[in-house]
Structures are given as structure tokens and as C-alpha cells.
Amino acid sequence: MLARYRMPLLAAVDQSTGLPVRKPKPVRYEVDRPGRLVHVDIKKQGRIPDGGGWRVHGRGSAQARKAATARDRAAQAGTGAPHGYRYLHHAVDDYSRVAYSEILDDERKETAAGFWQRANAFFQNIGITVSAVMTDNGSCYRSRAFADALGENVKHKWTKPFRPQTNGKVERFNRTLAAEWAYARPYASEQEREATYETWLHHYNHHRPHTGIDGQAPSARVHNLTGRYT
């Protein structure tokens, strides 16, 4: 009925007056070529215990409580094993949205530096020369190890404090992988979920339409991107 009478959605009107509320259109930016800016970030993700977590057994189940206790103990001990956390390190090209990602054990400076070296090699292998990288202000990214990994030819840009939308391309990638991979279906173990990650990344880079680039797959904007993820 709202559509028939050309009325705005109830969520878009002022509750006291019933008048449409005009919100400013968000400003989106995009660089003009692959490699001019790559967004780098880390997503912390809870491990799935063997036998499945609450998504398999239900919230409040004995298995779910046991997994939560083990995860908290692992976090306090500073280790991700056996039921703590995994860390998804991402590098997403601003122009093409092509993503390189690895699931690693921590977010230490040496780990972040090593990840970037492999990510940069991936981009070079598909013909992309990276000239700038954007990260948040995490300690691993402020380290000398990460600066050395970037080298003199890659400019390091920083997100604005308390404004994650500055790094919005990789934040959107995080939401996509959560909905379409991490929590898309119940997994019986962390190993089972991780075994599907490379296949999902290939689908994301080569086959999944991306609304931010007019429904193209990211690979369409990188002409020599091969059919292999690694």
C-alpha cells in the first residue's frame, strides 16, 4: 500500500509529524586504478569446537558453555588454541575489490608483517603494483616490522580514529564473509570451516557480483587475474 500511494517507508518518516526525513547521501570514494590503495585489516573470529558450537547444539547448551569457557581461558592465556580465536588477515584492493586473505593464529607485528609480504606478492603476481596501504591504528600496524614490510615505495595511510567507515571496503568484506562463509551454515569443527575458505575466496574474487562495482565480479577489474586464488 505504501508503494501504491507513493508513500515513504515508516522508518523514513518523522514519528511526530509524519514528514519524510531526508538523510544526506553517504559520500563514497574510489581510487582510479588497481593498487593505488589497498585496505588491510584483521578480523578476530571464535574457533568452532570439535563437534560444533551453539549453532549446532543451541544457545545455552552444555557444548556451547564448554566452548565459551575454553575460549575465555585461551584468551587469558594469550593463545588461540585449542578453542580460542583465529585471526583473519585481509588485504582488499580499493578499485577492484579483489581480496587476499589468510587465517592465522594471532595479530602480532611479525604475523601482520609476514602477511603483508605474501599479500603484496599475490598482487604483484596478478599485475597490481601497490602504492598505498590503509590500516587502522592497531599496534601491529604501528610497528617497525610492518613498516619494513611495506618498504619505501608503499605509502602507509591511517584510518580516522573511531571511524571504521574510513576503511569501509574491508569492513564490507568482513560482513560479506560472515554472512556467506563464516556463519552461512553450521560447521562441525574449525577445521571443517577453514577447509572451505579458499573455495569461498575464489567465488568472491571471480564469480560473486559486487554491487559497489556495478554488479561485476572483482576479477573483471583486473584483466590478468588467473583462475587460481594462490
Image: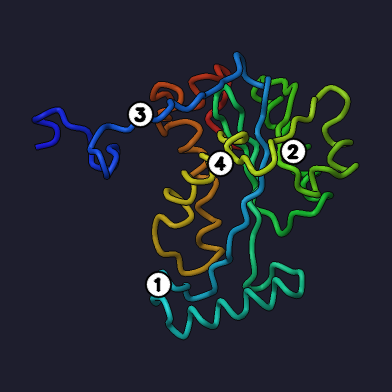
Amino acid carrying label 1: it is Val
Amino acid carrying label 2: it is Arg
Q: Is residue 139 left or right of residue 100?
A: right
Query: Which mark, residue 171?
Result: 4
Q: Tell which tag, 3 or 1, sits nearer the viewer.
A: 3
Instruction: Give the Cα distance between marks 4 and 2.
Output: 21 Å
Q: Percent position (x, y) of residue 84?
A: 64, 70
Tell me whether the residue at label 2 lies in contact with that at label 1, contact meaning CB atoms closer than 8 angstroms.
no
User: Based on the displayed image, in which of its 4 quarters is residue 54 positioned?
Assistant: bottom left
Give the mark, 1 or 4, whose residue is nearer the N terminus. Answer: 1
Q: Percent position (x, y) of residue 85?
A: 64, 64
Measuring 68% from the left and 38% from the top, which residue is drawn there? 40
Q: Tell which tag, 1 or 4, sits nearer the viewer.
A: 4
Tell me whether the residue at label 3 lies in contact with that at label 4, contact meaning CB atoms closer than 8 angstroms.
no
Q: Percent position (x, y) of residue 7?
A: 17, 31
Measuring 27% from the left and 44% from the top, which residue is drawn there? 15
In the rendered view, would you say 102 is above or below 159? below
Q: Tell which tag, 4 or 2, sits nearer the viewer.
A: 4
Quadrant (top left, top right, bottom left, bottom right) of the N terminus: top left
Identify the element where label 3 is drawn: loop
Q: Percent position (x, y) of residue 124?
A: 71, 25
Q: Tell which tag, 3 or 2, sits nearer the viewer.
A: 3
Instruction: Give the Cα distance between marks 2 and 1.
Output: 35 Å
Query: Which mark, residue 22?
Result: 3
User: Few, some or many C-alpha atoms within 10 Å of disc 1 (few <14, some 14-19, many ≥20)?
Assistant: some
Measuring 49% from the left and 47% from the top, which residue is drawn there? 177
Instruction: Give the Cα distance between marks 1 and 4.
Output: 27 Å
* Residue occupied by mark 1: 56
In the rendered view, would you say 182 is above or below 38? below
Instruction: Give the Cα distance between marks 3 and 2.
Output: 45 Å
Q: Tell which tag, 3 or 4, sits nearer the viewer.
A: 3
Quadrant (top left, top right, bottom left, bottom right) of the C terminus: top right
